[in-house]
Image (cartoon, rainbow, N blue to C red):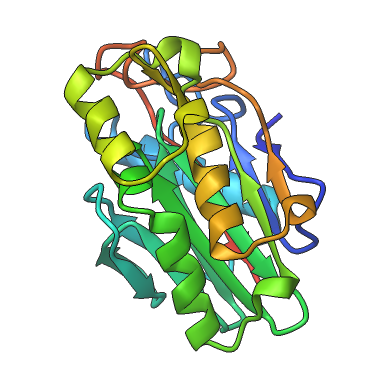
Amino acid sequence: MIWIKSNNIQCPHGFSTRHGGISPQPFNSLNLGGSHDQPENILQNRQMALQALKLADYDLCYLNQVHGKEVCVAKAGEQTGDALVSNQKKQVLAIGIADCYPILFYDAHNAVIGAAHAGWRGTLAKIAEHTLKHMLLLGADLSHIQVAIGQGISQNKFEVGAEVIAQFEAAGFEKNCWQQNKIDLAQSNREVLLKAGIAEKNIWVMQRCTYEDDFFSYRRDKGITGRMWAVIALP
């Protein structure tokens, strides 16, 4: 299975697994990024993955991700930031992941989409809230936005230093977002969305951990690993 889809976003989208590509170990097999695999493998994997969603002829919009809170209005090719928003058809927004959480956004009523990359720094900076604000500038309405949070490193696997916990506490996150020295990034992003005005019924969480065999994990594989994508496009 190449793609996992949410049940609340009714437009072309998906969260990729590591299955269905051509890359050899340790990138086996659907590696969609990173700097260690052969570029021709990554390119062919991307083409196959987008074809599976019938998005191969769309303009690909992707990011040089820097673990911040910058949101870009999507355009074809690479931009620097950690989220993309668009109200243009024939664009596919792509977020690269290998432990950080991908978040997809869709306002069907106003035809606006978004995609965000939320590691612990992006989560702390409330990248999800910033993405929503930029979607509103394109005509979206909070009451219509559906949000899907994909796979990422689970709380049980995400140990951090006390200084990181202190930063989350200082930023106003509720204490149910961590337990001792382990942060729940999925819950933290869900909290950001709720406080920003997204209805609880409009948030879907995959509840899968990137340490599972179906996924790539930067931490599990000590940096020598592939990359997955979360993608979304207007119908």
Indicate whether 12 appears above or below 176. below
Q: On the rendered structure, is 40 left or right of 60? A: left
* Residue 159 coordinates in the image, percent (x, y): 33, 13
User: Measuring 56% from the left and 84% from the top, which residue is drawn there?
Assistant: 88
Q: On the rendered structure, is 28 left or right of 168? A: right
Quarter of image, res 104: bottom right
Viewer-nearest residue: 180 or 141:
180
Indicate whether 148 appears above or below 31. below
Indicate whether 50 appears above or below 205. below
* Residue 75 coordinates in the image, percent (x, y): 39, 77
Q: On the rendered structure, is 57 left or right of 62? A: right
* Residue 109 coordinates in the image, percent (x, y): 77, 81
Viewer-nearest residue: 1 or 103:
103
Quarter of image, res 169: top left
The residue most toward the left is: 163
User: Measuring 28% from the left and 65% from the top, which residue is drawn there?
Assistant: 70
